[in-house]
Image (tube, rainbow, N blue to C red):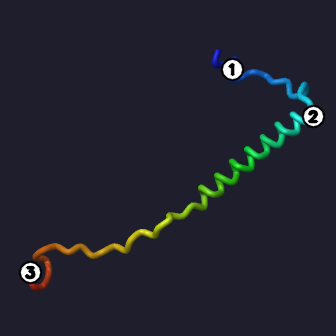
Amino acid sequence: MAFEIAHTQHAFEALSPARRLLALLAGLAFLVGLAWSCVTAYQAQPLDPAPPAKPLITPGAGPRGA
């Protein structure tokens, strides 16, 4: 049953010209949106830069700790 739902054949030629144009425009809009989201995700940068690394302070490890 799932195969029949996923692989139903729609009669594209039976649609009116207005509905056919609308279907083509919807498909084109989907493809443009998919391409835009892929390019945006590829070029994504972090919002905030990582904080600078602070040197670790270990008690008793300095020159006066000895």
Q: Amino acid at mark 2?
A: Pro
Q: Which mark is residue 27?
A: none
Q: Residue furthest left?
A: 66
The residue identified by callout 3 is 65
Amino acid found under the numbered disc labelled 3: Gly
Q: Which mark is residue 5?
A: 1
The answer to whether residue 44 is left or right of residue 3 is left
Q: Mark 3 or mark 2, which has the lower sequence index?
A: 2
Q: How many marks?
A: 3
Q: Residue sitting at 92 percent across and 30 percent down?
A: 16
| Residue in view at x 34 percent, y 73 percent | 53
Indicate the secondary structure of the residue bearing disc 2.
helix
Using the numbered discs, state the Cα–Cα distance from disc 3 to disc 2 in whole angstroms.
85 Å
Q: SS of the residue at dot 1?
A: helix
- Residue at the far front: name it: 18
Q: Which of 53/17 is in front?
A: 17
Q: Specify the amino acid type for callout 1.
A: Ile
- When asked about the image quadrant of residue 14, the answer is top right
Q: Quadrant of the N terminus?
A: top right
